[in-house]
Amino acid sequence: MKVLGVIPARGGSKGVKNKNIKLLGDKPLIAYSIEAAKASKLARTIVSTDSEEIAQVARELGGDVPFLRPSDLATDRAKAIPVIQHALAYFAEQGEVYDAVMMLQPTTPFRRVEDIDGSIDELAKSGADSVISVVDVEGHHPARMKYLGEDGRLIDPDFCEEYENQPRQELEAMYIRNGAIYLRRNEVLNAGSFKGDHCQAWHMPNELSVNIDTELDFAYARWVQENYLT
């Protein structure tokens, strides 16, 4: 299976200035995704960015930056699917066609090579439309969530726990996307969906599922790196 990796890294991040090239440990955030992708079985991995600065840093790290993304695909409201479709269309025009595409967000830096390769193997083996990485919700189980009424009253949803403070061990395990891997066959993406009708889960542990959007996330990522990943 020939899979294209795409690392989307637009400039102008609002929550953290220059987030994608900000140092995490001793290297820029985007370096983690570039390094893992280059060591994996992905046929080719590119960085899709609108920023000359990010492009230069990516190239210095050994990243492949074949184009600068159009500005209309780099706004705060730009969706991920058009960004990936743009990359696929770019290569299709050059006769470079892929069976599937994997989006590797640089803001989830701790994915491993085995997560990338295992997801590709899972897609091929299962015949699924897609594979998406997930993490156990652990201490934030949806069964404990509440709606908030207009008067400030807490309202139980239909899926709430059977009784107040029900032990976590009695609740059915649930998972949330961790942002590390979105892998899908091209025909599914062309239909405008990351997921498709048949999506397989790729489970990752909590310590590898850090997703960075804020300065607090950066601080937590540094703590995880120092205490769990060294």
Image: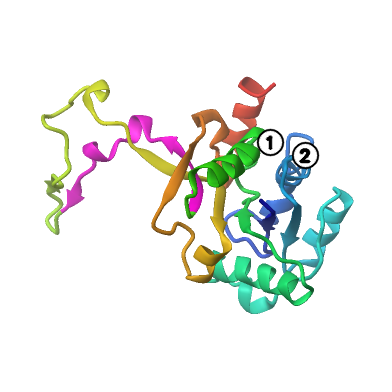
| Element type at mark 1 | helix
Is the residue 215 above or below the residue 151 in the image? above
Q: Is residue 105 magenta?
A: no
The answer, for residue 63, to whether it is visible in the render is yes
* Horizontal side, residue 143 vs residue 17: left or right: left
Q: Are marks 1 and 2 in contact (CB under 8 Å)?
A: yes
Q: Quadrant of residue 108?
A: top right
Q: Which residue is mark 2?
A: 39
Amino acid at dot 2: Ala
Is the residue 118 above or below the residue 78 in the image? above
Q: Quadrant of the C terminus?
A: top right
Task: Specify which label sits upstream in the sequence, 1 or 2.
Answer: 2
Q: Which residue is mark 1?
A: 113
Question: Number of callouts in the render?
Answer: 2
The local crowd at label 1, few if under 14, some if 14 to 19, many if 20 or more residues have their Cα within 10 Å, is: some
Amino acid at dot 1: Val
Q: Quadrant of residue 167?
A: top left
User: At x 54% / y 29%, what residue is drawn?
Assistant: 207
Residue 69 point in image, percent of width and height: 71, 72
User: At x 76% / y 67%, what residue is drawn?
Assistant: 96
Residue 64 point in image, percent of width and height: 82, 57
* Horizontal side, residue 221 vs residue 157: left or right: right
